[in-house]
Image (cartoon, rainbow, N blue to C red):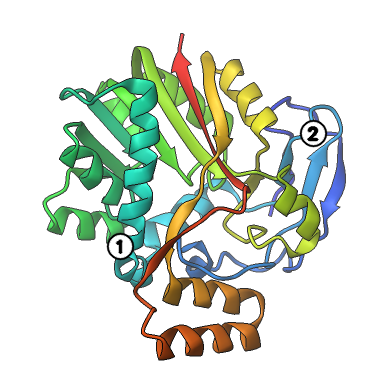
């Protein structure tokens, strides 16, 4: 693991926010980088910049180690959870189209598209949607469904000289080595006046403040912890005008939600799983919003 400077202001002056719960010498655990990982509470040291209050993992794995993990990761649980993800992405798309207006065949790039669920939802709504994703497994799953998801990162699309009307990052920015660099590339990939949507966790939310060290989003795979304020600052630094930012929840199957509870407390999780299975509600999807996930919409100036 390597020590790094603040990705927002560049200072190397931080204070401890949460002590590490894993050994700095531990190698990257690829399974911990699955979207559906329940490895809550397992994370490197998390610090807060004394100058701009940005929160990040420090020290952390090298950029090459991170991208190698995401190329190698496989996540069959995510495939099983597809119905809940579809509901979530339909909700996200409705909110996005309040900003962009109807699709009208315009181009959209979903960064970190995984198995292409949002790409499929957007295309059904009239967007000329493309996805880009590092996971070889996820790209294969998406392409098997006939979805235009390509292997790689934003750099892959820049090399192809592609430009888009809209770019989305759903639960991506907290995983990457250099969020500011990713937003700079998003700026280049967008046409003038194009819209970016960035969805992530809110470290300043009431839930995060109340739960402290027990906040479940403190995990191996999350190395950046934005507040609405720090994400807005980073967007502005990279040439964007923030249009709106606010909490947005998601849909989860009750059976899957029980497994998330088990990640926090095994006994409670087993009890919850038993109950929803006895009631035949494991496949029922419900809206969940604890106020600790948010989306920022911004326009390229």
Residue found at x 17% / y 22%: 104
- Percent from the top left, x then y, of residue 222? 60, 53
Q: Circle 1 sits on which residue?
A: 82
Q: Dot 2: what SS?
A: loop
- Percent from the top left, x then y, of residue 139? 25, 54
Q: Dot 1: what SS?
A: helix
Q: In this view, does 300 lie above or below 121?
A: above
- Percent from the top left, x then y, of residue 6? 73, 33
Q: Distance between the residues labelled 1 and 2?
A: 36 Å
Residue found at x 33% / y 53%: 87
Q: Circle 2 sits on which residue?
A: 53
Count of marks placed on residues: 2
- Percent from the top left, x then y, of residue 176? 53, 43
- Residue in the foreground of this view, choosing between 125 and 45: 125
Query: Is 47 placed left or right of 281 in the picture?
Result: right
**Label located before the other in sequence (1 or 2):** 2
């Amino acid at each position: 693991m390597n020590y790094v400077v603040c990705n927002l202001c560049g200072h190397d002056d931080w204070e401890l926010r949460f002590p590490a719960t894993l050994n700095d010498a531990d190698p990257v655990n690829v399974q911990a980088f699955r979207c559906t990982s329940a490895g809550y509470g397992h994370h490197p040291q998390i610090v807060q910049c004394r100058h701009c209050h940005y929160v990040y993992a420090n020290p952390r794995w090298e950029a090459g180690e991170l991208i190698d993990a995401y190329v190698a990761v496989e996540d069959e649980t995510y495939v099983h959870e597809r119905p809940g993800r579809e509901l979530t992405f339909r909700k996200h798309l409705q909110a996005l189209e309040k900003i962009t207006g109807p699709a009208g065949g315009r181009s959209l790039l979903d960064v970190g598209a995984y198995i292409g669920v949002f790409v499929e939802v957007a295309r059904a709504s009239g967007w000329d949607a493309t996805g880009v994703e590092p996971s070889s497994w996820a790209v294969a799953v998406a392409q098997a469904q006939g979805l235009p998801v390509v292997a790689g990162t934003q750099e892959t699309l820049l090399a192809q000289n592609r430009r888009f009307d809209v770019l989305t990052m759903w639960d991506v920015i907290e995983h990457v080595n250099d969020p500011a660099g990713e937003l700079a590339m998003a700026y280049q990939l967008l046409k003038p006046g194009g819209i970016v949507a960035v969805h992530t966790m809110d470290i300043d939310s009431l839930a995060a403040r109340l739960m402290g060290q027990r906040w479940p989003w403190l995990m191996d795979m999350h190395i950046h912890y934005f507040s609405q304020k720090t994400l807005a600052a980073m967007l502005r630094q990279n040439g964007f005008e923030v249009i709106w930012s606010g909490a947005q929840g998601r849909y989860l199957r009750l059976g899957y939600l029980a497994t998330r509870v088990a990640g926090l407390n095994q006994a409670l999780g087993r009890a919850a799983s038993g109950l929803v299975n006895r009631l035949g509600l494991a496949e029922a999807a419900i809206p969940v919003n604890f106020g600790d996930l948010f989306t920022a919409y911004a326009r390229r100036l």
